[in-house]
Amino acid sequence: MFRPLFAFSGSEMESNAKEIKSRDWHPLEYAHVFLWLVKDLCWAQGWKLAGTIMVPPAITVAIIITWLQRKRALTLVHNIAISIWISSNSLWMLAEFYQKESWMKPVSSVGFILGLLILAIQYSKFLLQYIWNKRK
């Protein structure tokens, strides 16, 4: 039977899977997706004021979700990456809106790279744990 690479029997993965199965999605997560989409729609349409106004609530909700779901390492890491991502995405949007791309866009790229690095480290831990468990 095919088994995905990260679907191994590590204790943290098992407990996280039980948590995901046992809880409904939090309404705040739905609100965050809505805020993010509205912000990006404003960006795509060139609505500077509306897009700028959407930045604080989108980032704030991402941070609140990260705080509320901090008990599980895997969930925490993903929510940190999402918070960094939405912050970098917002910075990029503001750079384009206010013609500050020369210095703000490279700064936003650092956030994207940091988010990917955080996830890569976490996934590497899981891969190493998987390999270690297979050897036993």
Image (cartoon, rainbow, N blue to C red):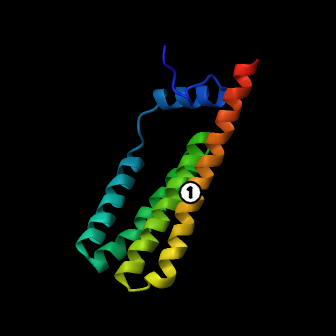
Helix, strand or loop status at disc 1 = helix
**Nearest the eye: 102 or 73:** 102
Q: Is residue 59 visible?
A: yes
The image position of residue 121, as x and y in percent, is 66, 47
Q: Residue shown at 44%/85% (left/top)?
A: 100
The image position of residue 74, as x and y in percent, is 59, 40
Q: Residue shown at 56%/61% (left/top)?
A: 113
Q: Is residue 71 visible?
A: no
Quarter of the image where one finds residue 75: top right
Q: Residue shown at 61%/54% (left/top)?
A: 117
**Screen quadrant of the C terminus:** top right
Total label count? 1
As drawn, which residue projects farthest toward the bottom? Answer: 99
The image position of residue 50, as x and y in percent, is 29, 74
Quarter of the image where one finds residue 71: top right
Q: Which residue is mark 1?
A: 115
As drawn, which residue projects farthest toward the top? Answer: 1
Q: Residue shown at 71%/23% (left/top)?
A: 133
Quarter of the image where one finds residue 98: bottom left
**Label 1 sits on what residue type?**
Gly
